[in-house]
Amino acid sequence: MSESDEYTPPKVWTWNKGSGGRFANINRPIAGATHDKELPIGRHPIQLYSLGTPNGVKVTVMLEELLALGHAGAEYDAWFINIGSGDQFGSDYVDINPNSKIPVMTDRSGPEPIRVFESGSILMHLAEKFDAFLPAQGADRAETLNWLFWQMGSAPYLGGGFGHFYAYAPVKIEYAIDRFAMETKRQLDVLERNLADREYMIGDEYTIADMAIWPWYGSLAKGILYGSAEFLQVHEYTNLIRWSDQIAARPAVKRGQMVNRPYGQPESQLLERHDASDFDTLTQDKIPEDQRGKVDPHRAGLKTA
Ligand SMILES: N[C@@H](CCC(=O)N[C@@H](CS)C(=O)NCC(=O)O)C(=O)O
């Protein structure tokens, strides 16, 4: 197929399994489980099943920030979900997230486990549970939720729109890249203007809005996403870059980014996190070479905490 090929949609859409492109093997037009699979449950009140993508990082950053504040109830087990091999379609997984996406969390601190899916919902659940990073009332609370929901509604245009057509689609379609590059630059400018006279998204206070926006737009502004720095001229968004650097420097953010991360430098990858000490002892550079990348060291019996 080339861009100049005419495409006339048939009367009824049918599933073309060989459509190509990254992720084509996991995309399906139906929901639900494809196989029976139990999910492991660890010893902590919070069980997270995730992967170190921008949507996953929002939650691990929040949990690390809560722990840094001294909230022991935010101790968590972070289990590695390989979306490339379809873990999100296992039966237990679909029971807690019928949408089959990472991240998903169960809060097992009460009499019955509570399932929480959608990263924005997870951030709100944790913020309300620990009364942290979400102002309790008034204009600041409204402003935090404004930006939190802005992120949830905007990032699909960045990831599913721009990122997909610029970096992952099997053909480069000018119309699609142009449309989503325009929208992405508009969104970057929305953030740039907001951060011109605010330290964080809502003002002086660091909130779940920053945690939701940073993994997507902070990375984009730093040229980390989709190899698109020059194409989008991201260096022009100087307020956004200042904010992005400021957040990246937080110790909890550094830790949160490492969790469930299967790429990057070996010392930045902690495939699963079950204990605070794992950051020092179980990153991929610290485990035997024949175990790296294949299994989590906990599951391999290298650590039993
Ligand atoms: N709106 C969802 C989006 C989650 C999402 O798109 N997750 C992606 C990874 S970043 C995923 O699990 N993809 C697997 C799939 O599409 O099968 C959220 O914020 O939690």
Image (spheres, rainbow, N blue to C red):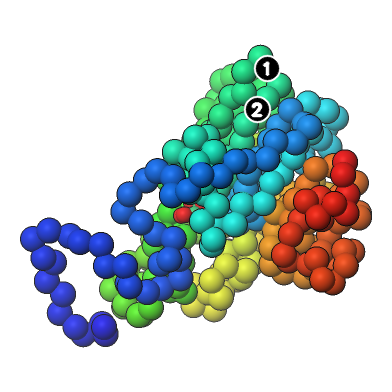
At horizontal 57% and vertical 67% (from top left) the residue drawn is 225
| Mark 2 close to ligand 1, CB under 8 Å | no
SS type, badge 1: loop
Residue 170 drawn at (x, y percent): 38, 78
Q: Which mark is residue 110?
A: 1
Specify few, some or many for label 1: CA neighbours under 10 Å numbering under 14, 14-19, or 20 or more.
few
State which quarter of the image contains the C terminus.
top right
Up-down: is 197 above or below 208? below
Q: Check residue 54 in the rendering and tell me which mark sits there, or answer none.
A: none
Q: Alpha-carbon distance for marks 2 and 1? A: 7 Å
Across and down, in percent, residue 229 comes to 56, 74
Look at label 2 and name its amino acid: Asp
Quadrant in which the N terminus appears: bottom left
Callout 2 secondary element: strand
Q: Is residue 201 above or below residue 15?
A: above
Which residue is at the front of the view, 268 or 15? 15
* Tag 1: amino acid: Gly
**Residue 134 as seen in the image, left or right of residue 98:** right
Q: Which residue is mark 2?
A: 107
